[in-house]
Image (cartoon, rainbow, N blue to C red):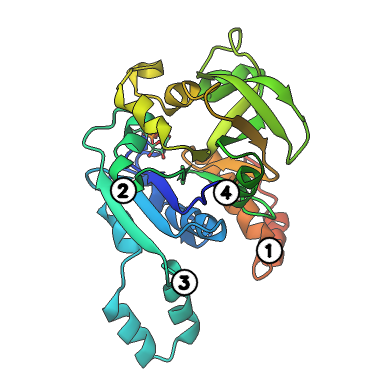
Amino acid sequence: MNDPIRKAVFPVGGLGTRFLPATKVMPKEMLVVVDKPLIQHAVEEAAAAGIEEFIFVTAAGKTMLEDHFDACAELVTALKAKNKSAELKMLEAIAPAGTRFSATRQPEPLGLGHAVWCARHLVGDEPFAVMLPDDLVLSGTPCLKQLVDAYGRVGGNLVAVMDVPKAHTDRYGILDVESDEGTEGGLASVRGLVEKPSPAEAPSTLSIIGRYVLQPAVFDELERGRRGAGNEIQLTDAMAELIGRQPFHGLRFAGTRYDCGDKVGWLEANLAFALARDDMGPAVEAALSRTGFARSTNR
Ligand code: UTP
């Protein structure tokens, strides 16, 4: 029996430079997709996978993220006075009963691996999930739930993966696979991991997106503080050290991933998530076909 995954780490210490000027003051994870900040999309996905404890690794200027999940007595009183019950329900759903939120600081942005290491005392000695909120996945079954279900079958460490164009391997952590079921929902057995390899050096085009299930042994590897690609402490390098000692799989998740740390990716996510909603999808579709949206519009 594999230990359950109860905790998720949300590394939110990055600078979000690709989304300036929006992210000058506002954390990237507070960018809204349709009507919810990215961090809330991520927390809801984690809750749907059975996560009970949400651990934010924050940095200076990121308190808005914690505030979003705090009780807000004034707003509740105002909504009650106005009999706004639908809005009240919406507020209550932000931090569901039985869940716990905690936060720790990453003192310097030394890389994703360093951010995860900063959460070691809050995670303790148990397997845990890592979620990058700027990777948003539209899917039938929430992406982290797919990963946790696969963990129930094979245990060890798992990463959600997808094929990327060969020319883009230098943007991702890339898998070297021993075997690969090759189908949606299938598992690839991992024999190596490389962070941001050039297309010529990439062992495959199977890339890691921001969903992980990891064993606590990864903290011992991160503890060494080795610098990797971009002179950052890379999570990929620490995970690579676990291969051979513990099971390590990539899951070809079912769904579409949007890079919301990128302006075009974020716009695409807004359209896809709005179109997928029963309450507004038809209206958004009608608006899109009405306007036609050629590049020349309004220039
Ligand atoms: P990104 O590579 O997207 O970097 O980080 P970034 O700084 O957030 O954004 P850009 O590239 O400057 O626009 C991937 C994830 O790792 C977290 C980020 O918050 C994001 O969730 N991260 C990265 C940290 O928490 N700390 C770091 O030191 C680096």
Please tell me which residue is depicted at 67% across the width and 51% down the height of the picture: 139
Where in the figure is residue 123, as x and y percent of width and height? Answer: 36, 46
Q: Quadrant of residue 296?
A: top right
The x and y percentages for residue 158 are 57, 36
Label 3 sits on residue: 93
Q: Residue at x 43, y 51 (%)?
A: 7
Work out whether mark 2 precedes mark 3 in sequence or the reverse, and give the earlier one: 3
Which residue is pictured at 57% across the width and 22% down the height? 174
Q: How far apart are marks 1 and 3 (CA)?
A: 22 Å
Question: Which quadrant holds residue 258?
Answer: top right
**Callout 2: SS:** helix
Q: Which amino acid does label 4 sit on?
A: Leu
- State the CA–CA distance, disc 1 to disc 4: 25 Å
Q: Which of marks 1 and 3 is nearer the N terminus?
A: 3
Dots 4, 2 in contact, CB < 8 A: no
Helix, strand or loop at label 3? It is: helix
Q: What residue type is labelled 1?
A: Gly
Specify the label residue 122 is tagged with: 2
Q: Which of marks 4 and 2 is nearer the N terminus?
A: 2
